[in-house]
């Protein structure tokens, strides 16, 4: 059921953002850095893609590389909780420009299974070293709201930098073929210690003005029916 809700969030977001003006094209990749954060559910999706496509040796090599990650200090929902309670908070983790290990010849090797953080990252102008991504506030607010929902969906499970979460999930027997090929298996435990635990949704961070534009997206997600229940009821534990 979690996979169905995740897919609903992805599909509805894609529909909502469909005609958004963007400069993004295949092969454009300055945005593919090691800043990507994911949930365990998204990690499982990537690992399933890796297993289905016989990429275990390739992934073990990638996960075995040395990294200098600037890890986030808190999850998106922890940050939202602090903000909504009037506390100063620095989520950290956003200024690494190191290239994502899954980028090869400017193409994402796991593209069909890429996480939401990659799917939602767009720009209305072509990015470069001098030109950061440009996007409207309400698009950023909507993307953040989706990340909060995805984190809520995976609460109490791993949340963190993509490589850390993938390494942490190598501890599960289904991923033994990847774990066995890691040059240093102790990295699995090290990565587990670097992850956070996904938190429940404390509320959204958008302004009243943004809310008007984002509300149709949230309504489309919450009213979707899965196994006879709405997504809203499932997320509320009903
Ligand atoms: S966000 Fe920027 S770097 Fe990434 S694909 Fe779009 S234009 Fe290219
Ligand atoms: S997972 Fe793929 S889309 Fe995401 S940052 Fe890495 S190469 Fe880019």
Image: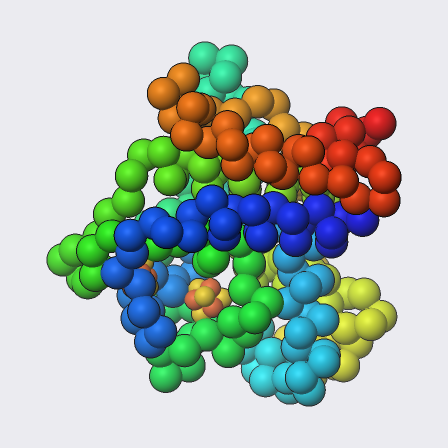
**Closer-to-camera residue (139/33):** 139
Image x and y of residue 153, in percent: 70, 41
State the residue lying farthest toward the top: 86
Q: Nearer the viewer, residue 59 or 201?
A: 201
Question: From this viewpoint, is residue 190 visible?
Answer: no
Measuring from the top left, give residue 189's x and y in whole percent: 70, 60
- Mark yes or no: residue 52 visible: yes
Q: How is the image coloured?
A: rainbow
Question: Percent position (x, y) of residue 1?
Answer: 80, 49
| Number of dots carrying numbers | 0
Decide: is 214 above or below 47. Answer: above
Q: Residue at x 85, y 39 (%)?
A: 228
Q: Name the one closer to the observer, 53 or 43.
A: 53
In the depicted structure, whether residue 33 falls above or below residue 39:
below
* 38 left or right, relative to 185: left
Image quarter of the C terminus: top right
76 left or right of 60 in image: left
Rendering quarter of residue 148:
top right
Q: Quadrant of residue 182?
A: bottom right
Residue 166 is situated, as x and y percent measured from the top left of the image, at: 64, 63
102 is higher (above) or lower (below) than 85: below
The residue positioned 42% from the left and 52% from the top of the image is 18
Residue 45 lies, with reference to residue 136, above or below; the image says below
Q: Identify the residue at image location x=29%, y=39%.
A: 136
């Amino acid at each position: 059921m979690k996979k169905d809700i995740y897919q609903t969030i992805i599909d509805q977001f894609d529909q909502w953002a469909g005609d958004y003006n963007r400069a993004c094209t295949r092969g454009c990749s300055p945005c593919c850095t090691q800043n990507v954060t994911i949930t365990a559910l998204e990690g499982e999706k990537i690992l399933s893609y890796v297993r289905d496509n016989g990429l275990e040796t390739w992934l073990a090599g990638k996960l075995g590389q040395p990294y200098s990650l600037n890890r986030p200090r808190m999850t998106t929902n922890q940050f939202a909780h602090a903000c909504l309670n009037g506390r100063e908070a620095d989520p950290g983790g956003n200024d690494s420009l190191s290239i994502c290990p899954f980028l090869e010849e400017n193409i994402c090797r796991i593209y069909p299974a890429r996480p939401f953080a990659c799917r939602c990252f767009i720009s209305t102008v072509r990015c470069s070293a001098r030109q950061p991504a440009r996007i409207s506030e309400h698009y950023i607010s909507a993307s953040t709201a989706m990340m909060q929902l995805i984190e809520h969906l995976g609460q109490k499970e791993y949340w963190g930098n993509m490589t850390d979460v993938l390494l942490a999930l190598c501890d599960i027997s289904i991923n033994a073929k990847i774990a066995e090929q890691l040059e240093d298996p102790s990295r699995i435990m090290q990565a587990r210690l670097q992850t956070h635990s996904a938190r429940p949704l404390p509320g959204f961070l958008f302004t009243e003005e943004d809310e008007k534009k984002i509300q149709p997206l949230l309504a489309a997600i919450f009213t979707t029916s899965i196994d006879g229940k709405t997504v809203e009821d499932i997320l509320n534990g009903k």
